[in-house]
Image: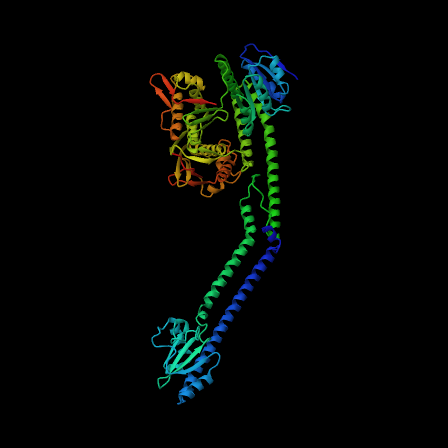
Amino acid sequence: MDVDTTSSPSDHGNILVVDDDAEIRLLVTRFLQRHGYHVHSVGRADTLLETLASFTIDAIILDVMLPGTSGIEACRQVRQVSTVPIILLTARSEEDQRISGLEGGADDYVTKPFSPRELLARLRSVLRRSRGQDRNAARLPQNRIGFDGWMLDTTRRELYTPSGVLIDLSTGEYNLLVAFLEHANRVLSREMLMELAKTRTSDPFDRTIDVQISRVRRKLEAAGNASQIIKTVRGAGYVFVPKVTFG
Amino acid sequence: MKRGLARFLPDTVVARAVSILAGALIAMSLVGYWVYQIGAEGLATAVRDRNLTERIVSIKRAVSAIPDEIERDKAAHALATPSLDVHWSKVELVPDNVPLTLRARTLEARLRSLVPEIGAEFFRVGYADDGAHSEGMEEAHRHMLLVSVRLSDGSWLNFASPTLGAVHTMAEHIPIIAGIIGTLIVLIAILLMRWVTRPLRDLAVAAERFSLDEARAPVSETGPAEVRRAARAFNTMGERVRRLVSERTMALAAVSHDLRTPITRLRLRSELLDDEPTRERIDEDLSEMETMIDATLDYLRMGVVNEVPKTFDIAAMLKTIVDDETDRGQSIRLEGVMHAPIRGKPVAIRRTLWNIIGNALKYGSAAAVLVGLEGDQVLVEVTDEGPGLPTEELERVFEPFYRVEDSRSRQTGGTGLGLTIARAIITDHGGTIALRNRTQGGLEVSIRLPALPTAS
């Protein structure tokens, strides 16, 4: 098993890339190094646990279609010993793969052929989340969040009404709702919401976050729930009112 | 039980049809024969009744010619036969005060019509059963028809016959009963023929509903021999078609999967380029390649999509799409209901709606989306402000790889598969999709899907 360890001047973290295509390994390594990461890469997942034991790894980019141990299987193995963030590389058409990967403990996925910049954004996001979690001590991954009869499935990223109807959400709306659910009954300022929901623009005078909130509200209200779920706190921000249950 | 019975059935459609035909013919012949018999019997009864009545008339004339009372009774006795008992008496056997029952009246009329001469006589008719007899004579004349004819001197000749007027009214109902039985035979024959040809109709239905879906059960190979053979041939053909399509699909899926790796490499390589304009152009080309691969794969997988159906809100889905397009600076608005649950495959439907709305924005510069409930259907109307389409193209654009002249240019792109896939998906959901040029200009796409009752 060849393990390339390439050092780089700046150090945003140690990333392990697992892909059976040598060329892709090399290109991803070069791309991530350009953005200040320390990269190890391997072609198979068979000895992934040993690699994890002998290096400090901050995140894994894991191809699903691998010879020998599959990416899904490797993902499960890693989860038994570590909470290191995992990003799966899946084929666009293989939804089942993606779901079983996320259920197996992967944090996120990028579909092949992926855009390098998207991969970078996802990587930053999972690293930020895992570092945040380290500070607040380990929080168990929740895949079903309930509120006021509604249910959010975070594995499939699906929102269901109390009568079981699936309500479509954009990525921005989904992220915003998750941010609210994780901080229910707390007043959140627009800046905090922007940070939590990872909206691209960070201009505090930008109205985008208000637009997103009004969109989420309208979707919640349209499904027949009259009670105010997201309340505006004048001058302070917003608060998510209902009781939230995890699990 | 049924299987045991089936063993004794003729095996082919021809044999079954012939036996049903033969059965119906035999049944009809039997009914005909029965009708004939009843008719003949009726005729015989009429002849017998006429004879008896004529005898009544002639006996009365013969007896009234004898002046001596003792001789009269003797003559009456001498003229009696087992079918017609005759007595001469001072009193009548059918008394005056007996109510004239319907059948007695009918019989009287019948006797008058059979033998007009009796009209010249004064007589009374009565059935013993109806109480038409003198006292003390009940037992002797049970079940008998009694006729009393008055002689010129006021004495009576009393006739009693066990056979006269026995069966007569039935004859008129015979054609009706025969008609009913005949109709029944025809109905039974029709039902049997329908039963015999049912496997054939099942096969036709299966052929109409043929889909590439592996899960669909094969046609059951039952029924007559010809139908079993056709069902077997149909199943084999279906299997071959499915295998052919799935082999092609797998080959294409493999090619497209293999293309993902070089495309991914190219994306990474272009990202490492320092030449920004070139990088952007490479990325555009790569996106176009991906779109084409995805569209081709979608097209090949039509009807074989493994997505699990869910209950979802198509209004919320349209809201997401419209909001997203608005954020990209497109001129688009959404009107209508805010909540419209349907049952279906959300990913497939989302792709379809994206495609339709994307087309409207591409060719029509501005678009309006209307979502509403119409009866038990959800109606989604996407209208644009573009030039519309020539009438003859409105249906043709749904054909695979067909492109409107303008969309062949690189600028607008398009694979010629979008609407084909859209129609396949909508049809798969039990809905319809149609294009129409609006009178006020622009194209209108109407999608109708079965609605779910809104839970309030």
Residue B323 sits above or below residue B204 on the image: above
Q: Residue at x 58, y 51 (%)?
A: B2
Q: Where is residue B44 drawn, in percent x and y?
A: 49, 76
Residue located farthest toward the right when viewing the structure as drawn: A1
Q: Nearer the viewer, residue B249 or A81?
A: A81
The N terminus of chain A: image quadrant: top right
Residue located farthest toward the top when viewing the structure as drawn: A9
Numbered label tally: 0
Q: Nearer the viewer, residue A79 or B174?
A: B174
Q: Residue B108 sits in which quadrant?
A: bottom left
Residue B6 sits above or below residue B85 on the image: above
Q: Nearer the viewer, residue B307 or B180?
A: B180
Looking at the image, what colour scheme do you see?
A: rainbow
Q: Where is residue B448 drawn, in percent x and y?
A: 44, 39
Q: Where is residue B117 drawn, in percent x and y?
A: 40, 83
Q: Nearer the viewer, residue A62 or A180?
A: A180
Residue A200 visible from this viewpoint: no
Residue A126 visible from this viewpoint: yes
Residue A156 sits above or below residue B11 on the image: above
Q: Where is residue B129 drawn, in percent x and y?
A: 41, 71
Residue B61 sits above or below residue B270 on the image: below
